């Protein structure tokens, strides 16, 4: 029997799932929570606290310690790691890791007796990695926009975007020229961890590479002109960009300490959203995927590049071929959790209070932290009702509905999806599930696994390293647990709510 391992390096935790395609076996997810399990990094939510809400960075050594701990836990759980025949992974998109010239040698000489973080400590030219929540690059985005105009959106699939890797690299090169000069390689979170597994620098895939404002989607190569304008000498610091189905790596002997066989193939990792597209089984035409995680995202597949790229959304490579659209909303679970905690509600009280409030009555701008879509640098929580006089249930319902209305408003497609595959931690909330179904007036389908990115990564490993087709894997692993039917009586209510939400948004930005 051949098992395939999928690892998901998310914002708040590192998780893994093992699958066996012949029998359809799928392990329970094993996870390491950065805040709880690695408190020495002082990052309760997966990033270093910073008073400036626009700056969000993480210590990349935390991800290395998490990888050691995750594999140790998998081994202790008794999972058959010695029968793993291929590995792939998923990384939170856009985050960048800056390595110096010591990195390749340090990778090549890893000793089993010491941890990864200890052995790679001198390989970083920058000690902190900006992650996707960082919104501090407005100046650089403006510079890119002024220089390249609409070409950036047409060729890279996205307008200059604060959290994207290109503007983040540009800021670092401008503000820290000496450290930039010491940087030999810039990796994404995905390609960094893939490199650690393979013991050598690994490429970036089209799925994650497209989230950098650097990949030309027409040629599928780094855009030399944009790269050089972004930072002098960037092109030679970028790993090559390759199709997501390649498995150019071989597992380093270091990982034999966890029972894994050295030399098994390592597939290029991809971003969390491209992996989730695979792991939710959302790749059929007409379907949409809504992922309710730290950020909320809305995505679907595209067989060709659109002639008019989306205004706020993005186009990434689809790991199964072609492209995918994505619209990302920063104010997701952390915002929902913030208000649940503020009202001191248990999860049950949260559900009951939302369920008791009337649907479609109130809307608000749900921006507790700087928002990516639409771009809102300064947080704003303004409603078309008296927020202070509302009951907790009314407020929470308005928050949840507005989070879903902003998705419908920005999805850019007036046609309703035929089905929405719902995933991410908050997809466990019955109230939120029903709101998604009612606002979009589309059936909402929940799969058997909530860990779509890790499952997608395991499926990609089985495809790239085991030759299994995506159709076969989707049928086996993306099984349906629950379908939530929309309430047709609320169709008009939410059409009107959408109009009201649109008016509110237009009055504020
Ligand atoms: C997508 C985005 C987030 C991150 C973290 O563009 O920024 O979805 O991938 O989940």
Image (spheres, rainbow, N blue to C red):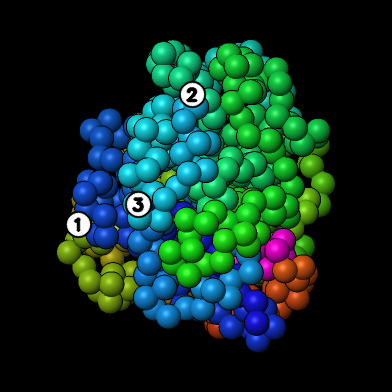
Name the spot of residue 69 as percent of width and height, x first: 35, 61
Residue 238 quadrant: top right
Neighbor class of circle 2 (other Cα within 10 Å; few <14, some 14-19, many 20+) is many
Provide residue 7's location: percent of width, then percent of height: 51, 61
- Reading the image, the residue beneath label 1 is 342
Q: Is residue 174 left or right of residue 155?
A: left
- For the residue carrying disc 3, how many other residues have a C-alpha within 10 Å: few (<14), some (14-19), or many (20+)? some
Q: Is residue 441 visible?
A: no
Task: Please state which of the two labelled residues, at mark 3 or mark 2, is closer to the viewer.
Answer: 3
Residue topped by disc 3: 115
Gap between marks 1 and 3 measured at Cα: 39 Å
Would you say residue 101 sits in the magenta stretch? no
> Which is closer to the viewer, label 2 or label 1?
2
* Residues drawn in magenta: 458-465
Magenta span: chief secondary structure: helix
Q: From the viewer's perspective, is residue 121 above or below residue 30? A: above
Quadrant location of residue 203? top right
In the image, what residue occupies the spot 55% across and 79% down? 26
Whichever of callouts 3 and 2 sits on the residue coming sooner in the sequence is 3
User: Looking at the image, which residue sits at the far bottom?
Assistant: 23
Locate the N terminus by quadrant: bottom right
98 to the left or right of 274: left
* Residue lying at 30% horizontally and 51% vertically, measured from the top left: 45
Q: What label does residue 295 carry, if any?
A: none
> Left of 357 or right of it: where is 14?
right
Element class at badge 3:
loop
Q: Label 2: which residue?
A: 183
Q: Nearer the viewer, residue 79 or 130?
A: 79
């Amino acid at each position: 029997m051949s098992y395939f391992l999928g690892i998901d390096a998310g914002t708040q935790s590192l998780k893994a799932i093992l699958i066996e395609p012949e029998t359809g076996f799928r392990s329970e997810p094993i996870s390491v929570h950065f805040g709880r399990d690695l408190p020495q990094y002082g990052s309760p939510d997966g990033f270093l606290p910073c008073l400036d809400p626009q700056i969000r960075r993480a210590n990349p050594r935390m991800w290395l310690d998490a990888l050691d701990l995750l594999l140790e836990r998998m081994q202790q759980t008794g999972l058959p790691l010695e029968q793993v025949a291929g590995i792939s992974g998923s990384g939170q998109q856009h985050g960048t890791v800056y390595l110096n010239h010591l990195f390749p040698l340090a990778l090549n000489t890893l000793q089993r007796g010491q941890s990864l973080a200890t052995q790679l400590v001198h390989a970083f030219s920058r000690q902190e990695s900006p992650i996707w929540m960082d919104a501090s690059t407005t100046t650089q985005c403006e510079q890119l926009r002024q220089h390249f105009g609409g070409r950036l959106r047409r060729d890279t699939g996205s307008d200059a975007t604060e959290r994207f890797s290109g503007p983040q690299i540009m800021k670092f090169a401008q503000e820290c020229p000496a450290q930039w000069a010491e940087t030999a390689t810039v990796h994404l979170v995905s390609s960094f961890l893939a490199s650690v597994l393979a013991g050598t620098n690994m490429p970036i895939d089209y799925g994650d590479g497209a989230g950098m404002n650097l990949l030309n989607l027409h040629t599928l190569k780094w855009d030399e002109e944009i790269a050089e304008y972004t930072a002098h000498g960037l092109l030679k610091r970028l790993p090559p960009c390759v199709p997501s189905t390649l498995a150019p790596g071989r597992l380093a002997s270091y990982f034999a300490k966890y029972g894994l066989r050295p030399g098994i193939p390592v597939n290029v990792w991809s971003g969390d959203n491209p992996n989730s597209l695979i792991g939710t089984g959302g790749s059929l035409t007409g379907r949409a995927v809504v992922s309710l995680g730290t950020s909320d995202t809305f995505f679907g597949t595209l067989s060709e590049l659109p002639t008019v790229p989306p205004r706020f959304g993005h186009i990434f490579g689809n790991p199964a071929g072609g492209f995918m659209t994505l619209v990302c909303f920063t104010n997701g679970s952390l915002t929902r959790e913030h208000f649940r905690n503020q009202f001191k509600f248990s999860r049950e009280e949260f559900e009951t209070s939302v369920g008791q409030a009337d649907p479609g009555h109130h809307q608000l701008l749900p921006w507790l932290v700087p928002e990516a879509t639409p771009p809102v640098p300064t947080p704003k929580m303004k409603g078309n009702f008296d927020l202070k006089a509302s009951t907790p249930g009314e407020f929470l319902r308005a928050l949840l509905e507005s989070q879903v209305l902003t998705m419908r408003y920005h999805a850019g497609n007036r046609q309703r999806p035929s089905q929405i595959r719902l995933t991410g931690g908050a997809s466990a909330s019955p109230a939120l599930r029903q709101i998604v179904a009612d606002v979009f007036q589309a059936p909402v389908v929940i799969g058997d696994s909530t860990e779509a990115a890790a499952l997608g990564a395991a499926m990609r490993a089985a495809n790239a390293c085991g030759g299994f087709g995506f159709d076969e894997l989707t049928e086996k692993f993306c099984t349906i647990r629950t379908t939530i039917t929309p309430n047709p009586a609320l169709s008009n209510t939410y059409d009107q709510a959408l109009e009201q939400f649109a008016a509110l948004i237009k009055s504020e930005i």
